[in-house]
Amino acid sequence: MSRRHESDGVAVHEIMGDLHIVEAEHVLRVFEQEPAGDPPVVIDLDRVHRTNDIARRMMLEGIRRLHVDGHDVRIVDPWGVLGAAETGTGELVRGEQARGGYVPTSFPDVASAVRG
């Protein structure tokens, strides 16, 4: 489950529960609705209980696409759901962790992520 709201003019995407392929696909569709530009986007993963490798890779690709669209992506991931959060370059390397590319800034909570 995910929901989008704004805090001080910053888009905040709260993602909750288990994050598997179907849920990650839903989140990517919501990310696609963010208009291109330079406003920051906060992705809050504090309430994600567990994820699988495919959903994690899908999320990293969504983050990469937000960055390509011009956004400063800020992550709240206190439980390390995304691991190293390297988005890679968009090249699919079978069975390997994405390397290089964009690494979003991590914050301990949504309030500090919104402040930047």
Image (cartoon, rainbow, N blue to C red):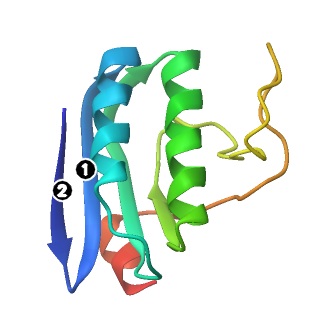
> Residue drawn 45% across and 21% down?
51
> Residue drawn 38% across and 64% down?
42
Q: Position of residue 93 (x, y in %)?
A: 83, 23
Between 104 and 67, the one nearer to me in the picture: 67
Q: Position of residue 50 (x, y in %)?
A: 40, 21
Between the C-alphas of marks 1 and 2, the distance is 6 Å
> As shown in the figure, which amino acid type bears the numbered disc 2?
Arg
- Report if the CB atoms under discs 1 and 2 are less than 8 Å apart: yes
Residue 105 visible from this viewpoint: no
Q: Position of residue 26 (x, y in %)?
A: 28, 31
Res. 14 mark: 1
Name the side, left or right, on which 98 lies relative to 79.
right
Name the side, left or right, on which 96 lies relative to 83.
right
> As shown in the figure, which amino acid type bears the numbered disc 1?
Glu
- Please report whichever mark, 1 or 2, sits nearer to the chain's N-terminal start: 2
Name the side, left or right, on which 87 lies relative to 66.
right
> Residue drawn 60% across and 52% down?
64
Vertical placement of residue 3 versus 102, above or below: above
Between 57 and 34, the one nearer to me in the picture: 34
Quadrant of the rendered structure where residue 15 is?
top left
Of marks 1 and 2, the one in the foreground: 2
| SS type, badge 2 | strand
> Residue drawn 80% across and 15% down?
94
Q: Quadrant of the N terminus?
A: top left
Quadrant of the rendered structure where residue 7 is?
bottom left
Q: Residues within 10 Å of mark 2 (few under 14, many from 20)?
A: some
Name the side, left or right, on which 52 lies relative to 47.
right
Vertical placement of residue 58 versus 47, above or below: above
Residue 104 visible from this viewpoint: yes
Quadrant of the rendered structure where residue 113 is?
bottom left
Query: Label 2 belongs to which residue?
Result: 4
